[in-house]
Amino acid sequence: MALTASGTPSVITGTRAKGGEPFIVTGYATDASTAAALKAAPGANKSLVIDYAQLGVSAATTIAHIQDEDGNILFGPLITATETGVMTKPVNIPTKVASNKAIQLKAAAAGSVSVYIEGRIIDDPE
């Protein structure tokens, strides 16, 4: 299931993202049991950095996470004992994704998942 964008926020360069080209992803998927693309791979010699992330789920069985295109978990999983839950990644601990890898939203079972990510594209060190 594809991610449905719920907005196109503006990015003010020089705020949270320090260095690189900032991006924001915000939206939801009604069934992320098949991985939904969040941000495409940035190209050769570049990497994505996740500076801030928030996941929300609508069912205890959904168990959502953010992963790279190879299935490596980058944030999560969000596991709740109730019907709804929210998980936030702190802004002071950025997560660098492997070079030229996309990020995806994935869940263990069908159910609505919302996501908000602030990140940046950086040049890989030589």
Image (cartoon, rainbow, N blue to C red):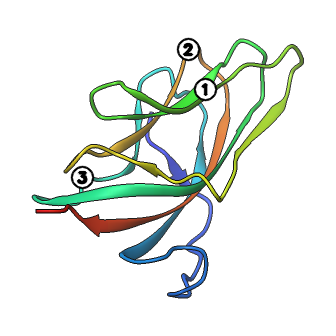
Mark found first going from the N terminus, 3 or 2: 3
Q: Nearer the viewer, residue 76 or 9?
A: 76
Classed neighbour count for the residue bearing mark 3: other residues with Cα under 10 Å, few (<14), some (14–19), many (≥20): many
Left or right for 115, reference 20: right
- Kindly state the secondary structure of the residue where label 2 is placed: loop
Task: From the top left corner, tell me how far across and down residue 25 is, in percent.
Answer: 52, 60
Q: Is residue 112 above or below residue 8?
A: above
Look at the numbered discs 1 and 2 and tell me whether their residues touch, using CB distance below 8 Å.
Answer: yes
Circle 3 residue: 41
Q: Amino acid at mark 3?
A: Ala
Classed neighbour count for the residue bearing mark 2: other residues with Cα under 10 Å, few (<14), some (14–19), many (≥20): some
Quadrant containing the C terminus is: bottom left
Q: Nearer the viewer, residue 29 or 80?
A: 80
Mark found first going from the N terminus, 1 or 2: 1
Task: From the top left corner, tell me how far across and down residue 39 is, in percent.
Answer: 37, 53
Q: Residue at x 43, y 41 (%)?
A: 2
Task: From the top left corner, tell me how far across and down residue 83 is, in percent.
Answer: 86, 21
Q: Is residue 47 above or below residue 24?
A: above
Circle 1 residue: 64
Q: CA distance from mark 3 to mark 2?
A: 23 Å
Q: Residue at x 36, y 77 (%)?
A: 21
Look at the numbered discs 1 and 3 and tell me whether their residues touch, using CB distance below 8 Å.
Answer: no
| Label tally | 3
Quadrant containing the N terminus is: top left
> In the picture, residue 125 is in which quadrant?
bottom left
Residue 108, label in figure: 2
- Kindly state the secondary structure of the residue where label 3 is placed: loop
Q: Is residue 16 above or below residue 115?
A: below
